[in-house]
Image: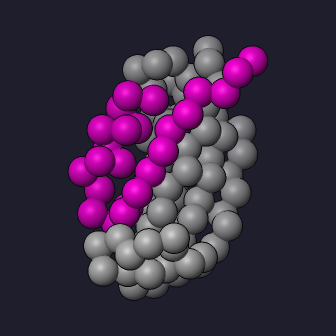
Amino acid sequence: MRAYEVLFIIRPDLEEEAIAAVVDKFTTLINNNGGEVTNVNKWGKRRLAYEVEGFREGYYTLINFTGEPATAQELERVLRITDETMKYLITRKDA
């Protein structure tokens, strides 16, 4: 198992319940695909460096997890097609 972290930005026009549902969706996806979430860090609403999809702010969330490469690939696939996320980055952490 490898250690990964994913940082994603959620659209700021969503309500708190919708933001929590998006974060739960991704943590559940990681767990269902053989991974294990080790930490979820919600940074909250922050200003973006540049405008993305017409927004100047977004909700940042950082999730640390362990899993196989297939887990990270499935997470990336779902992040790409999820309308609530504006940007994301998955990185493999050095052990």
Residue 61 found in image quarter:
bottom right
Read off the magenta span. Answer: 72-95
Mark yes or no: residue 77 visible: yes
Quadrant assignment for the C terminus: top right
Q: Position of residue 43 (x, y in %)?
A: 67, 67
Establish if 34 lies above or below 56: above
Say whether residue 10 is left or right of residue 36. left
Q: Position of residue 10 (x, y in %)?
A: 45, 67
Establish if 13 lies above or below 62: below
Q: Position of residue 63 (x, y in %)?
A: 62, 47
Q: Position of residue 55 (x, y in %)?
A: 38, 80
State how the image is colored. one colour
Residue 77: within the magenta? Answer: yes
Establish if 20 lies above or below 41: below
Q: Nearer the viewer, residue 57 or 42?
A: 57
Say whether residue 79 is left or right of residue 33. left
Q: Nearer the viewer, residue 34 or 13?
A: 13
Say whether residue 64 is left or right of residue 17. right
Residue drawn at point x = 48 percent, y = 63 percent: 9
Mark yes or no: residue 21 visible: no
Establish if 86 lies above or below 13: above
Q: Nearer the viewer, residue 39 or 93?
A: 93
Residue drawn at point x = 56 percent, y = 78 percent: 47
Quadrant assignment for the N terminus: top right
